Image (cartoon, coloured by chain):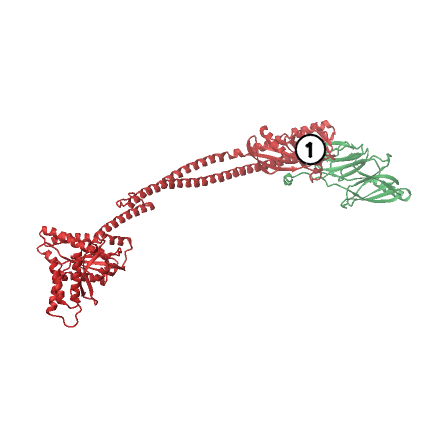
Chain colours: A green, B red
Amino acid sequence: MKTHLKLSILCSCICVGIVSQAANLSATISNQSDTYLEDAVVYLTATDGQTLEYTQKNEVVDQINKQFVQKVKIVTVGSKVSFPNKDDIHHHVYSFSEPKNFELPLYEGVPSELVEFPKKGVVSLGCNIHDWMKGYVVVVDTPYYAKSTKNGSLEISGITPGNYIINYWHPNLQGAPQQEPIQIKAGNNSLVKQLKTKTKIKARRAPRGRDRGY
Amino acid sequence: MQFKSFQSRLIVFFTLLLALVLSSTFVVVNQKNIRNAEDTILNDLAITANAFSELRKSRIESLYELVGSTTRDFAFLGAIGTRDNKTIIDAMNNNIIDRIFSLQTSLVILLNEKGDLIASTNEQIKKNYWPWLVTQAQSDEYGEADGIVQLNQVATQLVILPINARGIEAWIMVGFPIEEVLIAETKNITRQDVSVLAYDQEEFAIWSSSLDNSFLEDLKVHVQANTLSSKSQIIQLNNERFVSVNKVLEENPVANISILMQGSLDKALLPYERLNQALLLVFLVSLFSALLAVYWLSRSISKPLEHLSQSVKLIDKGDYSQRVSFVRQDEIGKLAESVNNMAQGLAEKEQVRNLLGKVVSDEIATELLSKKVELGGEEKIVSVLFSDVRNFTAMCEGAAPTEILTRLNRYFNKISLAIENHSGVVDKYIGDAIMALYGAPVSYSDCSDKAIASALEMIKALDELNIEFANEGISALEIGIGINSGEVVVGNMGSEQRMNYTVIGDNVNLASRLEGLTKHYGCAILLSEGTKKLSTLYTMREVDKVKVKGKQEAVTIYEPVCLVSELTENLAFELEQHAQALDLYRKKNWKQAKEKFSQLGTQHPDVKLYHYYKERCESLIDSPPSGSWQAVTKLNTK
Ligand SMILES: [Cu+2]
């Protein structure tokens, strides 16, 4: 992780300084009520069936205090993810999502096997012991991706200028990512995007307290 | 007969009145009973509707909870996660229909997040027939919705809720048959039949019902006739009256759903029917006893009234001895008492009348009884007759007082008869004297003639009595009679408590004076000038001109001789001679007068008056009067 960070800093220095056609994209994501969205995922994919080159990596999604840390994790297709349990109780991580249906039955510590995500798409994570534990692994087939911070901003750098399809996703978006074409010019590109999120259906807890109008 | 009709009128009146009161009471009570029965049914049906609603609500809540917890079940989610249709259907059958057996779920459907059909436990369902339910759930904050639909010809309660976990975004829809679950349960609790009525904007239809077919068929007829739209009404099912109530459950895009409930009015009225019968019996009994009471009451009035009326009729005919015999404290008793008192009073009055007739004459008695008896009188022209026994003392000689009274009464009987025979009225007896009235109280224009006739009969009657007395060795009676006629005051005199019917006035006194003169002149009867003036039937002989005590005017007095019709020539001649002699006497030609009176006295020795005048003439011749002599005799006798 640390080496990767250093590398990218170094790389960007070179690109800005030497490679004249290198570009970056900064974006600010909010919802329809102008609230900045955290954990919004933005990635660029190639147009017209072309493929972009990307690398597979081994990634980690921790479970700390009965929560997935990094609630949203972006990985490239074919990457492997480790789900280490940092709590002193068992977890039972699983997903029934279409791109990856998997299960890590009750375990403590670091499970022996890594979970490979061979298909792109959104994989919803859960724990069979703790209903409220929710996490997402967004599997992408591109090297250009980022997720927003608390103030809704994100930046993708080292992009080869050209035409792409920009993909937006957020846990509250529900359903497939939104797509639209985008032209990335050399240098700095920026955009502001409003996503139409849906209010999440509330979990049913106290039926007696509800007035259904009978 | 009159009372009989009074009785029947009373009976008819009371019967009608009572019948009216009772029948209106009956009608009011009956209507009130029907209203009560209806209210009871409506109340029961409201309870039923409430039970149905509560059951439905509780069932739906249970489904949300139990199905909701199932949809978080790892194994169930895993089965869905296989995305294998058969696995999913088995999981739904196993996890929901079988495991939540108590909820009697009959149908489970899995829909994707857009609402398209993924899998169904019912093979006949090929797609989502109820997308509106998904739409409703999407707009619900908990993602839940429910609705009533028709599935396989029966009403089905559907519930939809979301699956939103671990990469599965879907809707799960479950349903149960309303008839087997809600209607049957409601009937268990309330014993009331319930039907589900649906209106799909075109026609009404019964989707489910717990009613027996015989009732259901009739209900369907009403439903098809579209007559059950109002909230409550009375309908006929299988020849039984029902109160039918319609309560809306929901209005969904497919149909307006309501429940129909019926309560039997006839059954609810059964206890009231018994009450009605009891009431009818009470009414009949009270009507009958009231009739008896009225009959008895009317008889208790009419019977004594009849009795009274007969008694009164007899009393009217003069049988004053009649008495009504019953004793009662009420008004009729008082009436009977009054009738008795009246009869008693009448009897007493009759006695008084009889006695009165003896004490006073019949005429006066009638007069007294017919008018209000009060003090005061009126002026009338009457003839007053006074008669007196001249030699009463002689008659009394040597006789016991009772014997004297007996003789006197014999005399009075005869005399009274003579008076009454000529409409005279004995006014009073004064010792041996009688005072009689003619022309009062009943007025007669010929009162003078009546009095004269009466006086003549009295003389005749006395003669007959004297013959009887002579046979008994009793000395003969002599009487004098004076008659005056003129105006007198007639009426009741005395005090308020005790009064006499009598006459007063100068003319009464004169009659008495005339009587007193009879002895002097030797005449049995003396009449006044007034009597002579009123008389038309009798021939009279002038007796004298006298100045009586208490009177300034000289009055001419007469003596009746005979009826004019019976006047003979001889008698007329005699009277002529007398008149001439009297004339001579008055002209102071006493010698010639004496000759004539002497002659007359010789021819008619029984007329003492001729002798009287002969002597008077002799006396005048012997000692002629000094000064003026007016041929008026002054008499101081009473
Ligand atoms: Cu856990």
Image-based side of B171 in relation to A2, left or right: left
Residue B85 appears in which quarter of the rendering? top right
Image-based side of B305 in relation to B410, left or right: right
Image-based side of B106 in relation to B557, left or right: right
Kind of residue at badge 1: Met
Residue B284: x percent and y percent?
Answer: 43, 36
Q: Residue at x 34, y 46 (%)?
A: B331
**Residue B501 drawn above or below residue B208:** below
The reply to whether residue A132 is in sight is: no
- Between B176 and A66, which is closer to the camera in this rendering? B176
Residue B283 appears in which quarter of the rendering? top left
Ligand 1 near label 1 (Cβ, under 8 Å)? no
- Between B215 and B481, which is closer to the camera in this rendering? B481
Q: Residues within 10 Å of mark 1 (few under 14, many from 20)?
A: many
Q: Write down the residue under mark 1.
A: B173
Residue B465: x percent and y percent?
Answer: 13, 52
Residue A98: x percent and y percent?
Answer: 77, 32
- Between A101 and B148, which is closer to the camera in this rendering? B148
Q: Chain of mark 1?
A: B
The reply to whether residue B223 is in sight is: yes
